[in-house]
């Protein structure tokens, strides 16, 4: 029995350090690529939400004959406004969601680029920007 115990041994400190360095290098290489994919997913989600809101706004216009005013905002898609007798909503199943970064969508009617402008300012919540911070619009 003593012979069996003498043959068993653990990892040396050097072996453990080598393994930890290898794991650190892999995390440093894979981590940024993984997190950049998350940013791309949020941008795609914002584009999909804007597309869905556009369709709801178009349905609202078909029923009432006009788009909601800027003052009414996107809430007109879920709540009847006092002056809209032809409103047949709600036009969304749930409340208007914030963009994927938690900021409200910007809605303007009349728009500068079409009948209405619908946009998200991106991750930074500020106009302009590049990459994930770029504005996402319906035009």
Image (cartoon, rainbow, N blue to C red):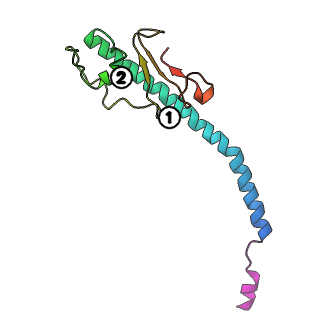
Q: Is residue 106 left or right of residue 89?
A: right
Residue drawn where x is 61% and y is 40% of the image: 35
Across and down, in percent, residue 66 comes to: 31, 9
Label 2, residues with CA under 10 Å away: few <14, some 14-19, many ≥20 = many
Name the one closer to the observer, 83 or 90.
Answer: 83
Magenta span contains residue 9: yes
Residue that extends furthest to the right in the rendered view of this protein: 14
Label disc, if present, on residue 78 of the rendered structure: none
Mark earlier in primary sequence (1, 2): 2
Q: Is residue 43 magenta?
A: no
Residue at the spot x=32%, y=24% of the render?
75
Label 1: how many Cα within 10 Å (few below 14, some 14–19, many 20+): some
Residue 31 sits above or below residue 84 on the image: below
Under circle 1, the secondary element is loop
Look at the numbered disc 2 and give the secondary structure of its residue.
helix
Residue under label 1, please give it: 101
Q: Position of residue 16 (x, y in %)?
A: 74, 66
Q: Residue furthest bottom?
A: 1
* Extreme residue toward the left, this view: 85
Q: Which residues are magenta?
A: 1-11
Q: Position of residue 105 (x, y in %)?
A: 44, 25
Which residue is rendered at x = 65% and y = 45% of the image?
A: 31
| Residue 111 x %, y % | 44, 11
What residue does disc 2 label? 74
Depth check: 108 or 13 in front?
A: 108
Q: Is residue 39 above or below residue 9?
A: above
Q: Residue at x 30, y 21 (%)?
A: 76
Is residue 25 depicted above or below 75 in this figure? below
Q: CA distance from mark 1 to mark 2?
A: 18 Å
**Is 100 situated left or right of 72 in this image?**
right
Report which quarter residue 71 is drawn in: top left
Q: Is residue 60 above or below residue 42?
A: above
């Amino acid at each position: 029995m003593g012979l069996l115990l003498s043959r068993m041994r653990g990892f040396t400190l050097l072996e453990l350090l080598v393994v930890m360095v290898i794991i650190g290098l892999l995390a440093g290489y894979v981590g940024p690529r993984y997190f950049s994919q998350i940013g791309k997913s949020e941008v795609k989600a914002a584009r999909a939400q804007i597309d869905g809101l556009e369709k709801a706004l178009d349905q609202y216009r078909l029923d009432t004959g006009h788009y909601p005013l800027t003052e009414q905002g996107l809430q007109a898609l879920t709540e009847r406004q006092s002056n809209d007798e032809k409103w047949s909503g709600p036009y969304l199943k749930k409340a208007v969601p914030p963009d994927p970064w938690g900021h409200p969508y910007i809605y303007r009617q009349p728009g500068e680029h079409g009948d209405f402008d619908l946009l998200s300012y991106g991750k930074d919540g500020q106009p302009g920007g590049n990459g994930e911070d770029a504005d996402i619009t319906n035009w």
